[in-house]
Image (cartoon, rainbow, N blue to C red):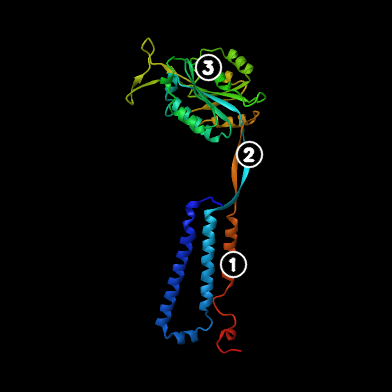
Amino acid sequence: MDWLHPAYLWTVAAGPALAAVLFLWTAQKRREAMRRFGLRDTVARLTPETSARRRRWKATIVTCAIALVALALAGPRFGTQLRDVKREGVDLVIALDVSASMLAEDVAPNRLDRAKNEIRKLLDELRGDRIGLVIFAGDAFLQCPLTTDYSAVRLFLDVAGPEAIAVPGTDFGAALDMAVQAFDIPAASPDDERSRALLFVSDGENHVAEIEELADLARDENIVMYAAGVGETGGSPIPIYQNGRRTGFRENADGDIVSTRLEENGLRQLSDGGAYFRIARTSSSLSKITEALERLQKSEFAQEEFEEYEEKFQWPLALALLLLLIERSIPDRRTNRTADRPGSA
């Protein structure tokens, strides 16, 4: 036997005890009121229909019902059953652009932080899929290998920033190569062919790779590519911060302020085999990728065995309800005066 909520076991004793105290206090107040009204024998003759014995029985029944409700609240469980749980889903690698242009503030608070927030929301909606995280700029780095531990992905996502990649630029090819390495984890069985999905989250600017070559490589590796464009197409300067304060904007060699904008063409070409999503100033369609992933063939990642108890809280709860119904059916007054009077035939 086990308890689902052992912290509530104290109510099994405290609940009935409190009820008993309240009933005793009420009975005491009733006796004091009768004494103030007149002599006890006189009051008894004036109210022959009332029955103190029935009140005591009703109080006892209610007290027992409260104890049973408290017992049900603690959640008694008997026996164990072994249950197999299968984890099914797809392999999804998120390639997050951490280049300097992602610090532009055309979406609040900036492109990189907005992208992180949308990825966190996406993780809240995913179920059973293995997630990996690649960060890239002019080079790429595997920030988090494929895992079903979404909390670990969130931790690695929090620390992702431009300082992690020293090479400037936006190299989708490097990100794809790193994603392929992440996908090449030995499978549980030779026949386990998992669906592979790669999501680029970027502003698409200054990319140095040939999109057609990347698409061919993705097809060869059986990878479905998706893309999410972050930012606005109107252009925005890239701020420079020191000690938490903005000191200016990035400039080119001629001293002109550099303006960065969302380049959707390259991202749309990347996602030609999948889907393109937009993370704009006031809206985001990234959550729709869950529908696209549902259409991919899911594979079994693992099979785990859990001990499952058989819940029995309904039995004391049902008995408590039955006792309350019985209590309601017992009247406070005698139904047959003559039968209850002393000396009656």
Residue at 55%, 16% (x, y): give it.
177
Q: How crowded is mark 1: few (under 14 residues within 10 Å), some or many (20 or more)?
A: few
Residue 291, given in percent of the width and then of the height, sits at 61, 32
Q: Distance between the residues labelled 2 and 1?
A: 41 Å
Q: Residue beneath label 3, please?
A: 172
Which corner quadrant of the image does residue 24 belong to?
Answer: bottom left
Q: What element carries label 1?
A: helix
Neighbours of disc 3 within 10 Å: few (<14), some (14-19), many (20+): many
Q: Residue 34 carries which label?
A: none
Residue 108: image location, x then y, percent: 43, 29
Q: Which amino acid does label 3 sit on?
A: Phe
Q: Is residue 118 above or below residue 333?
A: above
Q: What residue type is labelled 2?
A: Asp
* Residue denoted by label 2: 84
| Nearer-N-terminus badge (1/3) | 3
The residue most toward the right is: 191
Q: Which of 341 and 218 is in front in this view?
A: 341
At x 57%, y 62%, the residue is 320
Which quarter of the figure is the C terminus placed in?
A: bottom right
Kindly state the secondary structure of the residue where label 2 is placed. Answer: strand
Mark 3 lies on a secondary structure that is helix
Locate residue 193, reporting x and y percent. Answer: 65, 24
What's the CA distance linking mark 1 and mark 3? 71 Å
Label 2 or label 3, whichever comes before in sequence order = 2
Q: In which quarter of the image is residue 315?
A: bottom right
In-front residue for pair 121/315: 315
Gap between marks 2 and 3, in whole Å?
41 Å
| Badge 2 vs badge 1, beta-carbon distance below 8 Å | no
